[in-house]
Amino acid sequence: MRSEELVKEQALKEKELQLKFDLERFKIESGFRVNDESNDSTNACSVTSNLNLKKLIPDFDPKQSDISLYLVIFERQAKRASIEKKEWVGQLLGLLPLEIVQFIAREPEEQAENYDYVKKLLLKRFKLSPEVFRQKFVQHQKKIR
């Protein structure tokens, strides 16, 4: 009987972990943080900052936008909104298309929460190496009105 109880407890724990994982994945995909009753003021500020960033920065369009420039704009606006760097990934994911969010979600959790790692990953995904930047610089021409 004891072993049956242990098996039931283990199955219950696994189900609970799966639910936590699904909830965390949903939070990442949606870009919002769920309010915690223990510190409402901190989370209210996080949600407010997220909404402000959505107003300040347009959603990223991979077909028309340059990811490096988009990340520079994002970083500047996140600093202006006084968002802590550890929250940047969550904020950024709310602005990116679902296919890119899923690409990032496939990474290990510790790395997917590190903004610098996510930035390198995005630059690599869109193949923006130092050589590509040099080529863009050399080929850039001032627009004539």
Image (cartoon, rainbow, N blue to C red):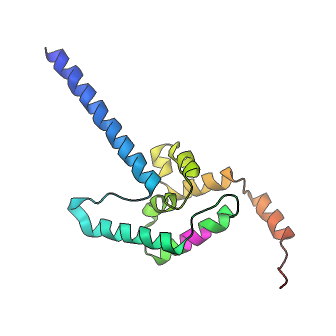
- Where in the figure is residue 61, as x and y percent of width and height? 64, 61
Taking the image as shown, residue 12 lies to the left or right of residue 82, namely left
Q: Please give the range of residues in magenta.
A: 72-76
Residue pushed farthest top? 1
Q: Is residue 18 above or below residue 145?
A: above
| On screen, residue 96 above or below 108 | below
Where residue 53 appears, as percent x and y from the top left, is 48, 71
**Residue 48's x, y, as percent?**
37, 71
Query: Toward which corner of the image does residue 21 lie, by quadrant?
Result: top left
The vertical placement of 18 against 40, above or below, is above
* Residue 65 vs residue 134, the one in the foreground: 65
Front residue of 86 and 45:
45
Q: Residue at x 41, y 49 (%)?
A: 26
Please indicate whether residue 44 sits to the left or right of residue 111 in the image: left
Q: Quadrant of the C terminus?
A: bottom right
Q: Residue at x 58, y 48 (%)?
A: 99
Asked if residue 5 shows in the view, the reply is yes
